[in-house]
């Protein structure tokens, strides 16, 4: 994949790339597959046998399992070799996030430690901080947590009240405040804490050790799901934090927090794929064992519909996850060459893909909620029983739409960030949008008789992008600077953007699979159903947006264009879904 075309964040809205330019999971190398297998084995042998005890809130057991994973090297995947890790690529990090996503609340504790508990120090710490903390975090010798959220400051992180003042001798920051919803709070040794120094407008970040006098850990919260993970409030009462534990520069905390959230969103997008595949496996195995009316329920069309939809959504989401992961790897390499600092290069590359990070977070968390819900339904009454894994999976899934910034915040970020990137001149969004809007009467679906399968599908994606651009221009023209207050319209546009990015990623993956292995019949089935559904979703969202920003003749002209641009070839979705389900049923597990 040398000299492949790489798009900037959000640029997919106005540019096309070819299948040869994307990375797909079918290209994992032997080392990546071995690392994933090690994670799988750990979950199977160490986590599952202890899951009931973990669910009862055994902090010491969770702590010991985390440390054991560290001893096996699983905590050092993303850490450079100089700090005791393995320095693996971002694609490999995402594969590990996916694989450990099958581990229920262990996955939450593990990902919090390896991600938000460790990486702020790796990415923003100086050499001394990295040597003192990252080396021990990479081995599991110490465990980490991240303290941003406060009782009065959830989505609006910068409104937090925690404060830090320099001591008279200039050796310490005196930290006061309260943090809540802190994952791993019950046993973490190091805390990345955000507070404002003096009367600063923005946050600063500090590395705080658990045993500093004045650090008080509250009791674990009682939660709907992820019951095995320790979640508690932490209080800081005149805690003396050495000045050398300021992370990054003064006032850089808000930037650190936002950057780490981008990283967390991407990793969550991978994590939920693992959980989704686990729920699919539970679903098909049960459907292949349970009999009703004298036959296996896996023979029923209604069950096949559910199984096929589960597969389609996880396969599509997975396509998007690894597409952007490789883009991030390539940008990391470029930035590392430019700046020479691996940590800063990594976080700059991750932060660049903020649009895609928000897409993966929202689409992935909603994908998993759908799959987890259908898994319970396939199990019927048994699905509601705490004896079954799908009951735990259903409860655990719900937090993902709140974690790493709520889906409401992230939906707005998708549109807002893409538009801001375009305003900076990174790609021509508004010029193309205006041209399309001003030539509504000339819009056609540009179908070419006898066009090939992939040319036809690419044309559909290109048309969906035109619908998005037309709606963006119409909304901006109508609301101008007050568009930020029209959250319903922004949500409509965001939904169109997300569906288009994921469907395009799926198309590119199936196209590349044909290059690699030839027979891709069932994957074309997945793409056909996904595209058919996406067209309807785009049309509905566009209708809602259009009637919100215009009326009369203009509305009629736009709606006519939307109808043309969302027209796709009709398919027999019943038979197509059945073919997808039949493969799953025959394999008796997810092998797509």
Image (cartoon, rainbow, N blue to C red):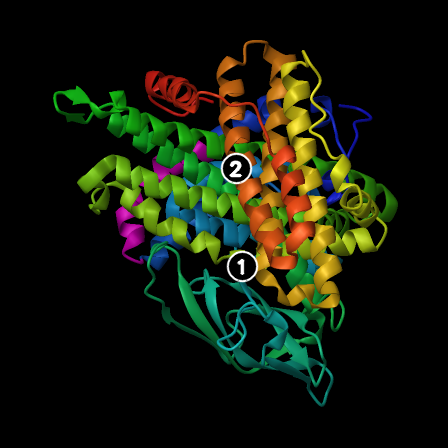
Image coordinates for residue 163, horizontal then vertical, percent: 62, 82
Q: Is residue 46 magenta?
A: yes
User: Residue placed at 51% from the left, 69% from the top?
Assistant: 210
Residue 282 locus on image (x, y percent): 31, 32
| In magenta segment, residue 274 | no
Q: Residue at x 84, y 55 (%)?
A: 424
Which residue appears at 65% of the width and 54% of the height?
552
Q: Is residue 436 left or right of residue 35?
A: right
Q: Which of these two is toward me, 410 or 490?
A: 490
Q: Residues within 10 Å of mark 2 (few under 14, many from 20)?
A: some
Quarter residue 389 falls in: top left
Q: Which of disc 1 and disc 2 is earlier in sequence? A: 1
Does residue 473 appear in the picture of this structure?
A: yes
Q: Secondary structure at mark 1?
A: helix
Q: Nearer the viewer, mark 2 or mark 1?
A: 2
Looking at the rendering, in which quadrant would you find the N terminus? top right
Spatial CA distance of label 2 from label 1 is: 22 Å
Numbered-mark total: 2
For the magenta stretch, what is the residue range?
A: 38-57
Towards the viewer: 537 or 198: 537
Disc 2 marks which residue?
Answer: 536
Which of the pair 327/519 is nearer the observer?
519
The residue carrying pointer 1 sits among few (fewer than 14), some (14 to 19) or many (20 or more) residues within 10 Å by Cα, namely some
In the rendering, at what x and y percent does residue 241 appear?
Answer: 63, 76
- 345 sits left or right of 414 in the view: right
- Residue lying at the far front of the rendered structure: 553
Q: Is residue 84 visible?
A: no
Q: Which mark is residue 408?
A: 1
Where residue 495 appears, x then y in whole percent? Answer: 57, 47
Q: Look at 24% across and 36% down and name the residue there.
A: 379
Label 2 close to label 1 by CB (< 8 Å) = no
């Amino acid at each position: 994949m040398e000299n492949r075309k790489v798009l900037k964040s959000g640029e997919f809205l106005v540019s096309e790339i070819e299948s040869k330019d994307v990375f797909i999971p079918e290209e994992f190398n032997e080392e990546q597959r071995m690392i994933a297998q090690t994670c799988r084995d750990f979950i199977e042998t160490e986590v599952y046998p202890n899951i009931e005890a973990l669910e009862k809130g055994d902090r010491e057991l969770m702590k010991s399992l985390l440390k054991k994973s560290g001893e096996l090297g699983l905590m050092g995947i993303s850490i450079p070799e100089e700090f005791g890790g393995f320095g693996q690529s971002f694609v490999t990090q995402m594969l590990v996030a996916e694989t450990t996503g099958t581990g229920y609340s262990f996955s939450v504790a593990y990902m919090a430690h390896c991600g938000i508990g460790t990486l702020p120090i790796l990415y923003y710490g100086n050499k001394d901080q990295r040597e003192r903390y990252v080396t021990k975090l990479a081995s599991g010798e110490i465990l980490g947590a991240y303290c941003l959220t406060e009782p009065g400051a959830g989505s609006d992180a910068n409104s937090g009240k925690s404060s830090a003042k320099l001591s008279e001798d200039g050796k310490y920051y005196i930290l006061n405040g309260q943090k809540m919803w802190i994952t791993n709070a019950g046993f973490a040794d190091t805390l990345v804490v955000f507070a404002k120094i003096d009367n600063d407008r923005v946050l600063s970040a500090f590395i705080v050790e658990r045993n500093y006098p004045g650090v008080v850990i509250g009791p674990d919260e009682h939660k709907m799901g992820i019951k095995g993970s320790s979640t508690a409030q932490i209080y800081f009462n005149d805690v003396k934090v050495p000045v050398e534990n300021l992370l990054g520069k003064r006032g850089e905390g808000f930037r650190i927090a936002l950057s780490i959230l981008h990283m967390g969103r991407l990793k969550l997008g991978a994590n939920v794929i693992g959980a989704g595949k686990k729920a699919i496996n539970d679903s098909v195995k049960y459907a292949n064992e349970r009999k009703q009316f004298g036959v296996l329920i896996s023979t029923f069309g209604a069950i096949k519909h559910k199984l096929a939809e589960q597969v389609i959504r996880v396969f599509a989401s997975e396509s998007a996850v690894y597409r952007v992961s490789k883009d991030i790897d390539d940008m990391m390499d470029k930035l590392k060459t430019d700046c020479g600092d691996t940590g800063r290069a990594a976080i700059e590359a991750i932060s660049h893909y903020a649009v895609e990070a928000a897409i993966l977070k929202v689409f992935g968390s909603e994908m998993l909620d759908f799959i987890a819900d259908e898994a319970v339904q396939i199990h019927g009454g048994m699905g509601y029983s705490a004896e079954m894994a799908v009951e735990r999976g259903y409860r655990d899934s719900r937090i993902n739409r709140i974690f790493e910034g709520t889906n409401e915040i992230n939906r707005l970020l998708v549109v807002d960030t893409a538009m801001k990137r375009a305003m900076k001149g990174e790609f021509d969004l508004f010029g193309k949008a205006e041209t399309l809007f001003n030539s509504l009467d000339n819009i056609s679906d540009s179908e070419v008789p006898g066009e090939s399968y992939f040319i036809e599908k690419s044309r559909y994606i290109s048309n969906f992008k035109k619908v998005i651009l037309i709606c963006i221009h119409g909304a901006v023209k109508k609301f101008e600077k007050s568009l930020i207050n029209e959250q319903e319209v922004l949500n409509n546009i965001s939904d169109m953007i997300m569906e288009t990015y994921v469907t395009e990623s799926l198309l590119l993956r199936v196209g590349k699979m044909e290059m690699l292995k030839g027979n891709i019949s069932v994957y074309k089935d997945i793409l056909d159903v996904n595209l058919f559904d996406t067209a309807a979703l785009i049309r509905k969202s566009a209708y809602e947006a259009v009637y919100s920003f215009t009326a009369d003749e203009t509305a009629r002209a736009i709606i006519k264009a939307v109808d043309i641009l969302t027209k796709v070839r009709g398919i027999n979705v019943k038979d197509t879904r059945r073919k997808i389900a039949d493969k799953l049923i025959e394999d008796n597990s997810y092998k797509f």
